Amino acid sequence: MGVPEGIEIEFYRRASLAALDRRVESVRVQPADFARNASASAIADVIEQHRFVAARRRGKLLLLDTAGATLGIRFGMTGRLIVDGHAVIDKLEYSSGRNDEAWDRLVIRFADGGFLAVRDQRRLGNVELNPDEDALGPDVFDVSGAQLGVILSASSRPLKARLMDQSRLAGLGNLLTDEILWRSSLDPERPADSLDTAERRRLLHHLRRTLAQLTSRGGSHTGDLQDQRHDGGRCPRDGAELMRSTVGGRTTYSCSEHQRARD
DNA sequence: CTCGACTCCTGTTAGC
DNA sequence: TGCTAACAGGAGTCGA
């Protein structure tokens, strides 16, 4: 299911509420380089014997606060969260269905016997101590129209690349972005600053609607375009051939008809 | 500022 | 049948 984008991390955040207010007995990070800006033992020293008091999220970054420090967790492509033995998401796209404890990169054991673990087969995720949250743009779940306008108007990069730039707007991944642009009838390669007012409003509308809808459906992989995201796929709306291209370095599917300007 | 190229990481799959 | 190589996407770095 899904791939860890904003929606999945929000599921992880909700699940990690169950980890609040429980005394941390031990913290294990493995391999050691899964810890980014602090050593594994430094993280353990700061977290052990404390309790998490809040679970927050900014974009794809999960934030677990103790009274004195914040643990930041990134899930990469294949990272899953397991709380007290229950996987929040059974299976991710682009990842094996296998479920191997050897892939547990972060294990936080509580004094009551429960635990919270990050199981990441490919190790593209990481953990940080007191991560720089302001390196991320506003969260995609509550970005305002005015904020989105500024984000778009300040760059001539391709629209899709701009929307996926986590330092400008935090939370959109490849699948969500393709879905939103498809619903918005916008060409992913259009310069971000070329959208007029009506197009920006349309984009904001579909961004919000898509997030809400795919959240209730269960993940970023439940979009209407998803089944056709392959060679030879056809647009579910008008039956036209889907185009596969590379935008901002990422594989992109878009409709050769309704996402192209015609005059 | 923006870009492409390269890196990390490994299970799945396309192609020979 | 069995092997290899490309591919999947999140994210950082580097040089042009």
Image (spheres, coloured by chain):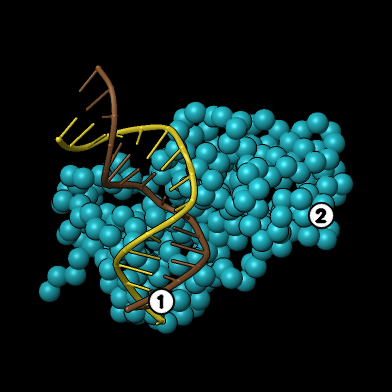
Chain colours: A cyan, B yellow, C brown
Where is residue A154 shown, x and y percent of the image? 42, 82
Quadrant of the image occupied by residue A183: bottom left
Quadrant of the image occupied by residue C5: top left
Three-letter residue code for mark 1: Leu
Image side of residue A179 versus residue A141, left or right: left
* Label 2 crowd bin: few (<14), some (14–19), many (20+), radius 10 Å: some
Q: Is residue A106 above or below residue A212?
A: above
**Which residue is labeled 1 in the image?**
A152
Residue at 78% x, 60% y: name it.
A69
> Residue A190 shows which numbered tag?
none
Image side of residue A112 versus residue B9, left or right: right
**Which residue is labeled 2 in the image?**
A46
- Which is more toward the observer, A119 or A141? A119
Residues at marks 2 and 1, CA–CA distance in whole angstroms:
40 Å
Q: Is residue A133 visible?
A: yes
Quadrant of the image occupied by residue A198: bottom left
Circles 2, 1 touching at the beta carbon (< 8 Å): no
Where is residue A73 shown, x and y percent of the image? 63, 52
Q: Secondary structure at mark 1?
A: helix
Image side of residue C13 versus residue A194, left or right: right
Residue at 64% x, 67% y: name it.
A133
* Label 1 crowd bin: few (<14), some (14–19), many (20+), radius 10 Å: many
Residue at 46% x, 30% y: name it.
A97
Between circles 2 and 1, the one closer to the viewer is 2
